[in-house]
Image (spheres, helix red, strand yellow):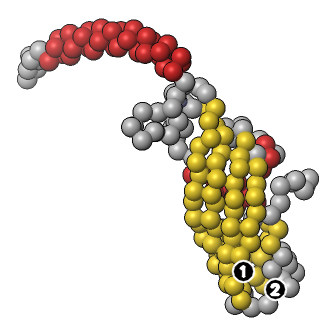
Amino acid sequence: MRIKDTQCIIDFAPLKAGEYSFLFTLDGELFKENHYEDIHDANLKVIIEFNKNSRIMMFNFTIDGTVNVTCDRCGDDFNLPVYLQKQLIVKTDGREHQEEDDMVTLATGEKDIDIAPYVYQYVVLSLPMQKLHPPEKDGTRNCNPEVLKKLKNIEVEKSSDEQYIINSNKRFSHEEEKPKKKTT
Ligand SMILES: [Zn+2]
């Protein structure tokens, strides 16, 4: 397996007991190398805080920044703000390396952890179903006005088509509503 370029290694083994905080900055390469094409670029600050006090550590992730995506409404690219907090339980001295939902067990001998795959997963899963230019203070979105003008025209045409379909459906449903003769 090719080692990925984007790595955020936390070398926890030599650390003494106590609280730690690590800061990483990630760019769009994380998404490019995982072939995730919805994100074209990124500028993310990742803070990992944990307390090394036992063989079970709680990694607190704070991911803050932007990802560049395409607006589903106007088709322009824009920077979507990302802010999320996640927790990952990191167990050490396991018999073998194991990954579950919010927990990773490291085998004895694993002395560091690459948190880049977790950041990738958290960010991708946090994306909304519909990616839209964020609203301004007055509630309007910063969409490309030229595209919106064209969209408006299409919507007008579509709504008259839809009206026709609704009308014809009504006609059909009326026909079906006629009382049926009893067959008994
Ligand atoms: Zn837009």
If the image is split into quadrants, where does the C terminus sit? Answer: top left
Q: Which residue is mark 2?
A: 15
Q: Which residue is mark 1?
A: 20
Answer left or right for 162 relative to 104: left
Tell me the amino acid under the disc marked 1: Tyr
- Residue displayed at 47% across by 33% down: 141
Q: Nearer the viewer, residue 182 or 38?
A: 38
Q: Residue 56: in sight, yes or no? A: no
Q: Earlier in the sequence, mark 1 or mark 2?
A: 2
User: How far across and down, in percent of the image, does residue 4 sit?
Assistant: 87, 54
163 vs 116: above or below:
above
Answer left or right for 31 relative to 66: right
CA separation in Å, label 1 and label 2: 9 Å
Q: Secondary structure at mark 2?
A: loop
User: How far across and down, in percent of the image, does residue 153 sit?
Assistant: 43, 11
For residue 15, which quarter of the picture?
Answer: bottom right
Q: How many marks?
A: 2
Q: In the rendered structure, are the residues bearing label 1 and label 2 in contact, judged by CB atoms less than 8 Å apart? A: yes
Q: Residue 82: in sight, yes or no? A: yes
Q: Secondary structure at mark 1?
A: strand
Tell me the amino acid under the disc marked 2: Leu
